[in-house]
C-alpha cells in the first residue's frame, strides 16, 4: 500500500492549516463567472496568491533562483491535492506557461522583468492561442505579426480567452513568417493588454456567466 513519507504528510497538514486560516468560506468568495464582479474576483485571487508567494508556494517546484520553492514532486502533489479539495484559486497562467518558457528561452532582461512579478502574483496573465478559424490547432492560426523597425505590428483575433478581461499581460502566439510551413513561422509575444489597438469583448454563456472573451488586435505594436 502506497503511503507518503512522514515529512510529506506533515507538509500536508501545514497546507491544510494555511487554507483554514487564509481562504474565505465558499459562500464569501467573489464569483469568477458573474458579469461585473471581475475586479473583486481579481483582488481576491491575487490577494490569496500573494500570501502563497510569501511562503514560496505559488511557484512551489520552480528553482529557488527564480523565486520558486525548489520543492519535491511529492510536496507539489500534496499541495495540488489540498488546494483542489478546497477549490482554492491557485490557477495562474504566468506560473503555468510564461515563467517556464522564459526560464528555458528568455533573455536575461526578460527574466529580470517578468519572472519576479510572476512569482509574486503582481501580474495577471492570459493565454492568447485559440482563434475562430483554428480552435486550439495552433498550426492553423492566422493572427499576423509584421516587423516594422524595432516593433512588431499585430493584427488578428483570438477567442475563448479565459480571464482576458482581467489580464495585465497576454501570452500571444502570432504568425511572423507566412511563407513557412504552417506548423512553423510562429513567434511568442508578451503583450501588454492595455496597448492601443487591443479590444477585449466578453463572451457571455447560456447561464449568463462571463469567463471567456474574444480579443481583437488592430495595428498593435509590441
Image (tube, helix red, strand yellow):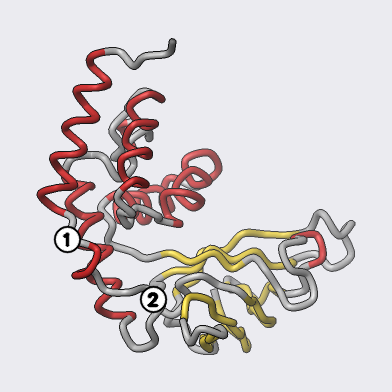
Give the left or right position of residue 36, taking residue 191 as reference. Answer: left
Q: Quadrant of residue 121?
A: bottom left
User: Are the residues flagged by discs 1 and 2 in contact, CB closer than 8 Å?
Assistant: no
Classify the position of the N terminus by image quarter. top left
Asked if 69 appears above or below 204 in the picture, the reply is above
Under circle 1, the secondary element is loop
Q: Nearer the viewer, mark 1 or mark 2?
A: 1
- Which residue is farthest left? 21
Label 2 Cα crowd, 10 Å radius (few <14 / some 14-19 / many 20+): some
Between 143 and 58, the one lying in front of the other is 58
Residue at 82 percent of width and 65 percent of height:
140
Asked if 16 appears above or below 211 in the picture, the reply is above
Under circle 2, the secondary element is loop
Q: Position of residue 158 (x, y in %)?
A: 64, 76
Residue at 67 percent of width and 68 percent of height:
130
* Residue labelled with disc 1: 24
Spatial CA distance of label 1 from label 2 is 21 Å
Give the left or right position of residue 179, taking residue 72 as reference. Answer: right
Question: What label does residue 166 carry, if any?
Answer: 2
Give the left or right position of residue 19, taking residue 163 as reference. Answer: left
Q: Position of residue 133 (x, y in %)?
A: 79, 76
How many callouts does the rendering have? 2
Earlier in the chain: of badge 1 and badge 2, it is 1
Residue at 21 percent of width and 55 percent of height:
50
Asked if 58 appears above or below 202 in the picture, the reply is above
Amino acid at each position: 500500500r502506497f503511503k507518503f513519507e512522514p515529512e510529506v504528510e506533515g507538509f500536508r497538514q501545514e497546507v491544510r492549516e494555511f487554507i483554514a486560516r487564509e481562504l474565505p468560506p465558499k459562500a464569501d468568495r467573489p464569483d469568477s463567472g458573474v458579469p461585473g464582479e471581475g475586479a473583486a474576483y481579481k483582488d481576491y485571487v491575487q490577494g490569496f496568491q500573494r500570501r502563497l508567494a510569501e511562503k514560496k508556494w505559488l511557484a512551489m517546484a520552480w528553482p529557488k533562483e527564480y523565486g520558486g520553492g525548489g520543492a519535491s514532486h511529492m510536496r507539489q502533489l500534496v499541495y495540488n491535492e489540498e488546494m483542489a479539495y478546497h477549490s482554492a484559486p491557485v490557477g495562474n497562467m504566468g506560473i503555468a506557461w510564461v515563467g517556464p518558457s522564459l526560464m528555458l528561452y528568455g533573455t536575461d532582461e526578460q527574466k529580470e522583468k517578468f519572472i519576479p512579478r510572476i512569482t509574486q502574483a503582481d501580474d495577471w496573465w492570459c493565454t492568447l492561442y485559440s482563434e475562430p478559424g483554428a480552435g486550439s490547432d495552433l498550426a492553423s492560426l492566422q493572427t499576423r505579426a509584421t516587423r516594422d523597425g524595432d516593433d512588431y505590428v499585430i493584427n488578428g483575433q483570438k477567442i475563448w480567452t479565459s480571464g482576458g478581461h482581467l489580464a495585465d499581460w497576454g501570452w500571444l502566439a502570432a504568425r511572423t513568417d507566412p511563407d513557412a510551413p504552417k506548423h512553423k513561422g510562429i513567434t511568442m509575444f508578451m503583450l501588454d493588454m492595455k496597448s492601443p489597438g487591443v479590444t477585449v469583448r466578453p463572451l457571455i454563456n447560456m447561464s449568463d456567466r462571463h469567463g471567456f472573451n474574444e480579443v481583437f488586435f488592430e495595428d498593435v505594436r509590441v
